[in-house]
Image (tube, helix red, strand yellow):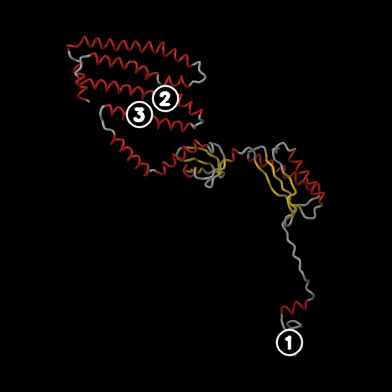
């Protein structure tokens, strides 16, 4: 290849073909004029037409390929200019190879601009992809585009790239085996970004950690625990665990069983159930969708009232304040009705009462009817 390029340069610099060089330069200038006309009028008209379409995607694609299109217009001019020169037959393939390589370079330039440009970012936003994933994908795609272009250009110049590609495959396999944990974390990060089980600022609970997500990356997430410690969890661990996102709950649940004593009359128990239900149904901070207050069961040491409802707020501090307020009002209802809260208790009943102390003594001292002193009295 280098030998042919040197021969091409020597051919161009010969004294006998200066007039042909002038014609070749004129051909190049003519195509440059066409490029300017295309840029000013035709391309400008196409861009104005794209403003009338409902999406900006077509205009952004044209902007990415504006520079390569200009190059593709000028490139045939250089090709024709070189072929106008009296080139030896050995240089014909070299000129054709340069022309084809130039076309590949222009197309690569266009796709390189497209990936990571406005159209790429707009498409990612429509698909609701995370910005970090868009940046990572842009770098990977640009590397692939350049690698493919270089391999195609090398094949145009009769270079065998199969060994290079095979080497890349073996090298990639070796790197993947050596860094399989890092690769697993990267793919875990991609899964988290695509699946979106949580966002920065969410309160999450996993078997590994509970707290607020502060940072997300392709290797790990950082969670601030309620003890104010910062925990870093690898992505491969998170994607294999059950994640509870408390931030995304629509409302917060409260449920418990209120046990009252067995001595409570039926009318008072019914009044307590009705008043507690009215309290919850009319409370401004209780969600009205599901409120259950029922006399549920006869428990071992209490009559149980089942209370189940949700608060509208999801904020923990506000939730506790509402729960406290409702608890005090339930106590007030119980006091008004004269109903006591039961506590765990157990009664023991004897089937036969002990008759007298003698029977108890006989049980302790078999064979003696008068206790431990009777034997001594008989001896005397």
368 shown above or below 351: below
The Cα atoms of the two marked residues, 1 and 3, are separated by 116 Å
Of 53 and 352, nearer the camera is 53
The Cα atoms of the two marked residues, 2 and 1, are separated by 116 Å
The Cα atoms of the two marked residues, 2 and 3, are separated by 13 Å
**Label 2 environment density (alpha carbons within 10 Å; few <14, some 14–19, many ≥20):** many
Nearest to N terminus: mark 1 or mark 3: 3
Q: What residue is shown with label 2?
A: 114
Mark 1 element type:
helix
Of 286 and 1, nearer the camera is 1
Does residue 325 appear to the left or right of 124 in the view shown? right
Nearest to N terminus: mark 2 or mark 1: 2
Instruction: Name which quarter of the figure residue 314 lies in.
Output: top right
In the picture, the quarter occupied by the N terminus is top left
Q: Are marks 1 and 3 in contact (CB under 8 Å)?
A: no
20 shown above or below 9: above
Q: Nearer the viewer, mark 1 or mark 3?
A: 3
Residue depicted at 49% across the width and 35% down the height: 194
Q: Are marks 2 and 3 in contact (CB under 8 Å)?
A: no
Does residue 157 appear to the left or right of 114 in the view shown? left
Instruction: Name which quarter of the figure residue 17 lies in.
Output: top left
Q: What residue is shown with label 3?
A: 146
Residue depicted at 44% across the width and 21% down the height: 61
Does residue 2 appear to the left or right of 38 in the view shown? left
In the picture, the quarter occupied by the C terminus is bottom right
**Label 1 environment density (alpha carbons within 10 Å; few <14, some 14–19, many ≥20):** few
Counting from the top left corner in percent of width and height, residue 352 is at 78, 71
Query: Tag on residue 376?
Result: 1
């Amino acid at each position: 290849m280098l030998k042919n390029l040197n021969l091409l340069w020597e051919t161009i610099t010969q004294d006998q073909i200066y007039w042909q060089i002038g014609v070749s330069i004129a051909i190049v200038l003519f195509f440059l004029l066409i490029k300017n006309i295309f840029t000013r009028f035709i391309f400008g008209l196409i861009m104005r037409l794209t403003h009338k379409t409902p999406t900006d995607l077509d205009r952004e694609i044209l902007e990415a390929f504006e520079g390569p299109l200009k190059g593709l217009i000028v490139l045939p001019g250089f090709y024709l200019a070189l072929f106008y020169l009296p080139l030896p037959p050995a240089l014909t393939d070299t000129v054709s190879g340069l022309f084809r390589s130039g076309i590949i370079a222009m197309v690569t330039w266009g796709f390189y601009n497209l990936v990571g440009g406005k159209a790429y970012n707009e498409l990612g936003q429509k698909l609701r992809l995370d910005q970090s994933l868009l940046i990572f994908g842009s770098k990977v795609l640009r590397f692939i585009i350049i690698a493919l272009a270089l391999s195609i250009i090398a094949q145009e110049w009769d270079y065998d790239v199969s060994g290079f590609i095979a080497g890349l495959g073996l090298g990639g396999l070796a790197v993947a085996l050596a860094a399989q944990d890092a690769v697993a974390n990267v793919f875990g990060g991609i899964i988290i970004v695509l699946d979106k089980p949580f966002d920065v600022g969410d309160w999450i609970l996993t078997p590994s950690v509970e707290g607020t997500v502060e940072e997300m990356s392709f290797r790990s997430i950082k969670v601030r625990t309620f003890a104010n410690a910062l925990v870093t969890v690898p992505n491969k661990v998170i994607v294999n665990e059950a994640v509870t996102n408390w931030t995304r709950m629509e409302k917060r649940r409260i449920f418990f069983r209120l046990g009252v004593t067995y001595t409570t009359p039926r009318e008072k128990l019914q009044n307590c159930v009705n008043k507690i239900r009215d309290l919850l149904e009319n409370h401004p901070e209780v969600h009205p969708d599901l409120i259950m207050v029922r006399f549920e069961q006869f428990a071992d040491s209490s009559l149980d009232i089942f209370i189940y409802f949700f608060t509208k707020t999801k904020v923990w501090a506000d939730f506790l304040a509402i729960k406290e307020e409702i608890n005090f009002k339930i106590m007030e209802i119980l006091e008004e009705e004269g109903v006591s809260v039961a506590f765990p208790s157990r009664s023991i009943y004897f089937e036969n009462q002990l008759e007298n102390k003698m029977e108890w003594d006989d049980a302790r001292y078999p064979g003696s009817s008068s206790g431990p002193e009777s034997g001594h009295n008989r001896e005397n």
